[in-house]
Amino acid sequence: MAGILLAAMAISACGSGTSSAKPQSTTPGSTTPNDTSLGVGVTNDSIKLGISLVNFDCIKQYTDTIRLGQRAVYEAFIKDINSKGGVDGRKIVPDIKEYCPLTNQQILTYCTAFTQDDKVFAVLGTFIDFSGDAQTCIAKQQKRLLVTFDLTQAIMDRSPAGYIVTPGSVPERSVNILLDLAGKEKLLDGKTVAVLGDSNVKSVVTNSIEPGLKKLGVKTGSTAILSISGGDTTVPQSQLDSFIEKWKTEGVNAIFMSGNYASAKQFVEKIRQRMPDVMLLADTTNTLAQAQQEQSAGVKPNPYEGLITAGGLTPKESDESTNWKFCADIYKKETGKDAEGAQQTIKSADGKNIIDNHGTISDACQLLWFFHDIGAKVGKYLNNNNWVNTVNTYGHVVNRGSGDYSSIHTGKYAADDNWRLQKYDSTVGDTGNWVPITPLQNISS
């Protein structure tokens, strides 16, 4: 059970989502340098980057969705960038490491391996530690830059401003946007809403979800914070049993789930079995992987049916976008293979696993080009001080794995501004997907 939960969290956390952007000039001139030194791992003609990837060999027995060949995909996009002049004339020199996410021990050791032993300038990739300790080690303790996904604002705030940036979003923003849009659509009118989270996202629950519900004037039930340690779900399952019975007495008919743990299928299945008509909301679109695993396994009804989140473009919109074409064309040029789109479902030869090639391609393209564009704007003197100055004054940024609307600036280091209400529909494609409830909007605040 421990391995199953942590493996599920790892694959759910891998990925940026799918949406579109219009490729355009991505380096609108260099910023004026505050510091004329070069950062650690930077020479006149090269930049050393750490690339962190989940090793799916250690978790494939526990999860339905896996990624294969990640190293080759990242190397393909790095080769493309280097062939186009690198980052302001500097070639990327990758230092790629894979880690087993069943505990955070290995990724914590990679913090010192990347920074002290290998002396990289920045770390990119799927650098997952829900406690935030590994991210804080990179950015605060070792004073390196981190460009990744699956962060919270609370984790980012533990390090110097601008040292951690993401082309994606953070749950604190998605909570505010989801509740704002839900209020306008009157989705929660007449509902009694309970909140379900875990100790890793307690700050999101306390500082964002509960105040947001209060602001809407929504009637609320009890808040459940599950005690999840490692991957053992014995205690949290028992806690959830108690809260379900309490929610029934409180008349709860909607549950807002926060984070990757509380929205895992082990818990959602139990909720649906005992509260079949409850409305589910979540502050993360990573729930899609869990929903699709249930659909692939033939679970009926799918417990995630109708789950509401705040998200971006639909898979169809993404596949038809010029932005995905940009990434897919690079992948085709460098590998000779067609890139799998967001609407495709690829199964392993034995039929036991979904192969998430699209997620691997999308993440590599998005993260590397996001770093490229910021680094190129920093210009000749690439170091931490000038990086922070650049992200603080950047404004609109082209975001290859997102929509037309993205921005970074002082106090806002999560770029994605493409938002709409969406819900999971198991009838879309082979494994279900998001369908829009509201039109796409540019929400940058």
Image (cartoon, rainbow, N blue to C red):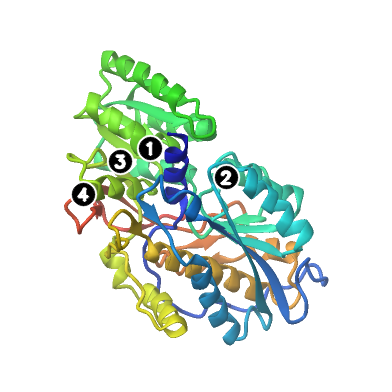
Label of residue 129 in the image: 2
Q: CA distance from mark 2 to mark 1?
A: 17 Å
Residue 239's x, y, as percent? Answer: 41, 20
In front of the other: 125 or 156: 125
Q: Would you identify the image quadrant in which residue 400 lies? A: bottom left
The Cα atoms of the two marked residues, 1 and 3, are separated by 19 Å
How far is the residue under mark 2 from the one under mark 3?
A: 30 Å
Could you tell whether 278 is left or right of 444 in the image?
left
Which comes sooner in the sequence, label 2 or label 1?
2
Q: Quadrant of the N terminus?
A: top left
Where disc 1 sits, the SS reads: loop
Is label 4 in a helix, a strand or a loop?
strand
- Residue matched to label 4: 425
Q: CA distance from mark 1 to mark 4?
A: 17 Å
Q: Which residue is mark 1?
A: 263
Q: Residue furthest front?
A: 350
Looking at the rendered structure, the kind of residue marked 3 is Ala
* Disc 3, SS: helix
Residue at image location 44% in from the left, 24% down from the top? 234
Q: Do the CB atoms of the residues marked 2 and 1 lie less than 8 Å apart?
A: no
Of badges 4 and 2, the one in the foreground is 2
Mark 1 or mark 3, which has the lower sequence index? 3
Name which residue type carries label 4.
Asp
Question: Which percent across, then down, holds residue 445?
Answer: 48, 51
Give the number of callouts.
Answer: 4
Residue beneath disc 3: 182
Mark 1 Cα shell of 10 Å, populated few (<14), some (14-19), many (≥20): many
Depicted 280 relative to depicted 313: above or below? above
Looking at marks 1 and 4 on the same chain, the residue that comes earlier in the sequence is marked by 1
| Residue 108 showing in the rendered view | yes
Q: Left or right: where does residue 203 sit relative to residue 222?
A: right
